[in-house]
Image (cartoon, rainbow, N blue to C red):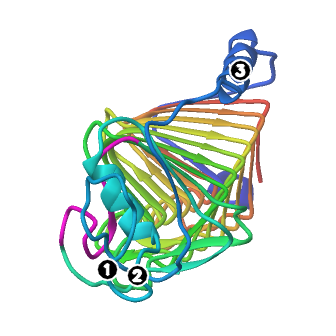
Amino acid sequence: MNQHMRAFHSGKQFLILSMFVVVISGIIGMISFMSQTAVVHAVSFTVDLAADATDTNPGDGICKIAEPPKDLCTLRAAIEETNALPGADEIIIPAGEYILNRAGTDDTAYDGDLDILDDLTIRGDAAATTFIDGGGIDRVFHITDSVSLTVTNVTVRNGQAVDGAGILNAGGTLTVISSTIHSNQADNNGGGINNLSGSVSLSNSVIFNNRADKGGGIYNLDSSGTMSLIDSSLISNTAVASGGAVFNGGLLTMISSTVSTNTAVISGGGIIQLGGVMTVTNSTLSGNEAPDGSGIYNNNSNALLLNSTIH
């Protein structure tokens, strides 16, 4: 089989079209308008200590730790406060490294991963300067059912978990803007992001060098899961089985994005599509590797490519 045939495997319907789609243009315009809309947050905390320490009294509206240096605000303490307070809150993180080191299985953000229990926006200085690091003890973020998390201008890295090592979205809404998710490793599914259900949207972001059994970069298998990638890149992610960059069984929309140099040991070096619906517009898939479907492996699913390239 020649290289061109290996790059794409399809078991059902796959259309490659060159056309101008007014609906897509309208969607992009709407997203741009929405991004400029001001959001008023109930409470805003600014982190001023990089250590991983807990809050003295979650819910009192004051972010401060009990251990020395006292009365400073850590990322974990700020999340404990926002979890306990009603309304959509905000956390500002200055440039620096924020490494998690409180091992445990608690589901309130007291230890282990950073559990998000209420709507929250986290704003860093820039992805190149603000690092939220799992420290290899757990995943970094766990979004609970019906909760929204927006992360802007940060890097999420070095998470380690069974599923969703960077971010696990368990039925909530995740928005990633101008951020990087890299060097996370899951034993099973979703090295960078595992969307169990719910909605995930990435814009102007990078998913890089993550690893998992399935979905090295992103795992979006549930039929109710939606995944949107706009002006984003998935680069050098690895799947021990299938879906080097993306393992999709839900609704996947990709616009003006790049999927390159990802690897799968079995199938779908770039993307594997199993039972979901995928639309790829103005995007490029290049240099991905797998024995079957190095670019895309499409099995009994609907996939539509508009003005896009696989090579």
Helix, strand or loop at mark 1: loop
Provide the residue designation for mark 3: 33
**Cβ–Cβ under 8 Å for marks 3 and 1:** no
Check residue 115 for magenta coloring: yes
**Cβ–Cβ under 8 Å for marks 3 and 2:** no
**Cβ–Cβ under 8 Å for marks 1 and 2:** yes
Q: What residue is shown at x 53% (from left), y 66% (from top)?
A: 47
Quadrant in the picture for the N terminus: bottom right
Query: In the image, which is nearer the foreground, mark 3 or mark 2?
Result: 2
Check residue 113 for magenta coloring: yes
Q: Earlier in the sequence, mark 3 or mark 2?
A: 3
Relative to residue 63, is residue 15 drawn left or right?
A: right
Depth order, front residue of 261/142: 142
Q: What residue is shown at x 46% (from left), y 70% (from top)?
A: 73
- For badge 1, the amino acid type reads Ala
Provide the residue designation for mark 1: 66
- Of the numbered discs in the image, which one, if any, rests on residue 231? none
**Residues at marks 3 and 2, CA–CA distance in whole angstroms:** 42 Å
**Label 2: few (<14), some (14–19) or many (≥20) C-alpha neighbours in 10 Å:** few
Relative to residue 268, is residue 5 drawn left or right?
A: right
Where residue 82 appears, as percent x and y from the top left, is 35, 51
Where residue 164 appears, as percent x and y from the top left, is 37, 63
- Of the numbered discs in the image, which one, if any, rests on residue 70? 2
What span is in magenta?
106-119
**Label 1: few (<14), some (14–19) or many (≥20) C-alpha neighbours in 10 Å:** some
- For badge 2, the amino acid type reads Lys
Q: Is residue 201 visible to us here?
A: yes
Helix, strand or loop at mark 2: loop
Q: What residue is shown at x 35% (from left), y 35% (from top)?
A: 87
- For badge 3, the amino acid type reads Phe
Q: In this view, does 102 lie above or below 221?
A: below
Query: In the image, which is nearer the foreground, mark 3 or mark 1?
Result: 1
